[in-house]
Image (cartoon, rainbow, N blue to C red):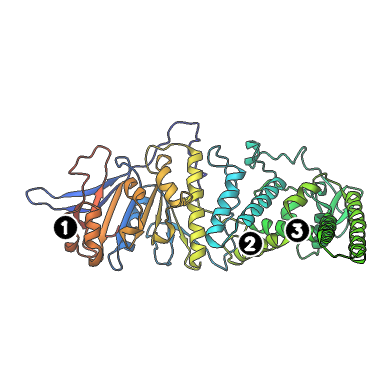
């Protein structure tokens, strides 16, 4: 969601929020005048809400109604539409994610928040998210973290220097980009600095993009007719500005690492050394064995000598090829090409979903309601999308600082698959921490059991549109309701609604049965 709207920074005063009074309907009690069961974003204990209702209970109608009223009041509202049927009547923007979308998410973006942001946090968040979609072993997680650290470094991000977490500070650019004139039929890549990559990576880049070096301008160039020209210019072209890496960059980086492991001579030297050790162990066992012959010993010693000579030659070649001084460290970190190959396959699988294109959608700053239509995504992709989006909004609002009341809302239908007990779950974390930054999460589910205790305790409003008879008794006990209370609810006509106000009393903050307000 576009948060570039002129609001205050974290160092400024608590920002103001629009006022919204949302009526859930009329409460009619004996010996008492009817009154509205009203939710006031400035008066409630938190802007979060939970809505429970089975099929046909009016859950979708209530979600659409809330989106309309939130948007009309100036609350910046996101509707996550998993079925493609929640269309607000107020002016809104619809963004559709699917295999044919021309834009996507970037799960590798870096937050500048000193507490929750940084390079390590971004890498760990991505590893956690990808681990929810595909199985990652300990070695794969470690290797992926190292690959990400290397990729972030290449893009000008460093965990040790928080200045680099911002796109405004680029440690790679010591001087403004200079004007160069490319040779005829070529395009200059002024941002490509080959000194920062290994010899094997240089070879890979030259082969992939048909690069050649212009001795006059001291700049690498790519042919204008090359099929990957646009990609190369985007990464290293004139006027290049700092940007975070994306999933396509990670895929290329892993593939280049895999090539380097296959082409690098230091791998050969180590393998030769392993062969020397193997022959030495064989010789030792043979000498401890009773009844061995001199011929057997001579044969193994000859093999050991041959392996030793091959190792010396391989190490000599590796020393001759050493350029960056980091070759030994890289060798120790990247000794298993099978792990790197498996990571490459997993990242390619994510890319094929179409969800992670490098270009983000352009949001209309003049509308208050943004509808994300994710019907075209499969269930795994929906989970990734929602975890990423909620976390992204939470971080951006945290960077803006405290807010006096809810001024941003996210409405999520069929929320159950996106909630778990993990401390890393973005929805649960935002429900717990994002209230003070102005974010209100409204989660809709068919069963109350979808919501864990922390969410139940943090919700400023709880709405029961209806539950199945076989779980009604359990729900009544959990909510401390009068036995049989849920039996009398009429779908799309009445509901039990609890609004927890800061200054409410035992009566006003309890569940009340109300006649549901109509659609706005």
Image-based side of 13 in relation to 98, left or right:
left
Image-based side of 445 in relation to 12, left or right:
left
- Tell which circle, 3 or 2, labels the residue nearer the N-terminal end: 3
**Separation (CA) of disc 3 from disc 2:** 14 Å
**Residue at horizontal 58 percent and vertical 66 percent from the top:** 353
Residue 252 position in % (x across, y down): 71, 59
| Few, some or many residues within 10 Å of mark 2 (<14, 14–19, 20+) | some
Residue under numbered circle 1: 483
Residue under numbered circle 3: 256
497 shown above or below 300: above
Give the secondary structure at mark 2: helix
- Tell which circle, 2 or 1, labels the residue nearer the N-terminal end: 2
Image-based side of 361 in relation to 462, left or right:
right
- Please tell me the numbered disc located at residue 413: none
Q: Which of the image's four quarters has the C terminus?
A: bottom left
> Which one is closest to the eye, mark 3 or mark 1?
1
- Tell which circle, 3 or 1, labels the residue nearer the N-terminal end: 3
Whether residue 237 is visible here, answered yes or no, is no
Q: Residue furthest front?
A: 291
Residue under numbered circle 2: 347
**Separation (CA) of disc 2 from disc 1:** 52 Å
Of 254 and 82, the residue lying toward us: 254
Q: Quadrant of residue 135?
A: bottom right
| Few, some or many residues within 10 Å of mark 3 (<14, 14–19, 20+) | some
**Residue at horizontal 80 percent and vertical 55 percent from the top:** 201
Whether residue 509 is visible here, answered yes or no, is yes
Of 103 and 193, the residue lying toward us: 193
């Amino acid at each position: 969601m576009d948060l570039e709207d002129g609001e205050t920074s974290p160092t400024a005063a608590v920002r103001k929020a629009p006022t919204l009074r949302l009526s859930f309907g009329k409460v009619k009690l004996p010996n008492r005048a009817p009154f509205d069961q009203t939710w006031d974003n400035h008066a409630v204990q938190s802007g979060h809400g939970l809505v429970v209702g089975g099929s046909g209970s009016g859950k979708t109608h209530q979600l659409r109604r809330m989106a309309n009223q939130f948007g009309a009041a100036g609350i910046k509202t996101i509707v996550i539409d998993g079925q493609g049927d929640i269309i607000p009547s107020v002016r809104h923007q619809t963004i559709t994610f699917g295999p044919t979308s021309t834009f996507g998410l970037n799960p590798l973006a870096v937050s500048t928040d000193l507490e929750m942001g940084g390079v390590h946090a971004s890498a760990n968040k991505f590893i956690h998210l990808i681990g929810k979609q595909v199985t990652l072993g300990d070695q794969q997680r470690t290797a992926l973290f190292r690959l990400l650290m290397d990729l972030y470094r290449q893009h000008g991000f460093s965990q040790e220097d928080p200045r680099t977490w911002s796109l405004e500070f680029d440690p790679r650019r010591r001087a403004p980009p200079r004007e160069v004139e490319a040779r005829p039929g070529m395009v200059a890549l002024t941002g490509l600095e080959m000194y920062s990559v290994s010899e094997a990576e240089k070879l890979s880049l030259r082969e992939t993009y048909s690069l050649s070096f212009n001795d006059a301008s001291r700049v690498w160039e790519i042919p204008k007719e090359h099929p990957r020209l646009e990609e190369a210019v985007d990464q290293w072209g004139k006027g290049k500005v700092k940007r975070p890496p994306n999933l396509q960059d990670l895929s290329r980086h892993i593939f280049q690492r895999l090539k380097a492991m296959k082409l690098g001579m230091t791998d050969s030297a180590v393998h030769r050394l392993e062969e020397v050790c193997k022959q030495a162990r064989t010789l030792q066992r043979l000498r401890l064995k009773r009844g061995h012959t001199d011929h057997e010993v001579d044969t193994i010693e000859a093999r050991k000598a041959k392996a030793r000579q091959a190792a010396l030659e391989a190490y000599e070649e590796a020393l001759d090829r050493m350029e960056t001084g980091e070759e030994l460290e890289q060798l120790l970190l990247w000794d298993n090409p099978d792990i790197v190959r498996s990571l490459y396959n997993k990242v390619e699988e994510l890319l094929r979903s179409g969800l992670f294109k490098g270009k983000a959608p352009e949001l209309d700053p003049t509308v208050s309601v943004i509808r994300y239509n994710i019907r075209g995504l499969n269930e795994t992709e929906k989970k990734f999308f929602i975890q990423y989006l909620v976390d992204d909004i939470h971080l951006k609002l945290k960077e803006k600082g405290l807010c006096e009341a809810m001024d941003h809302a996210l409405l999520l239908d069929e929320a159950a698959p996106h909630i778990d007990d993990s401390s890393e779950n973005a929805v649960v974390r935002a429900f717990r921490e994002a209230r003070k930054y102005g974010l209100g999460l409204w989660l809709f589910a068919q069963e109350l059991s979808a919501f864990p205790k922390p969410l139940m305790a943090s919700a400023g409003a709880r709405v029961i549109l209806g539950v199945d008879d076989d779980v009604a008794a359990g729900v009544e006990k959990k909510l401390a309701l009068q036995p049989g209370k849920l039996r009398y609810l009429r779908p799309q006509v009445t509901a039990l609604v609890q609004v927890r106000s800061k200054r409410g009393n035992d009566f006003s903050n309890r569940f009340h049965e109300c006649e549901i307000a109509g659609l706005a």
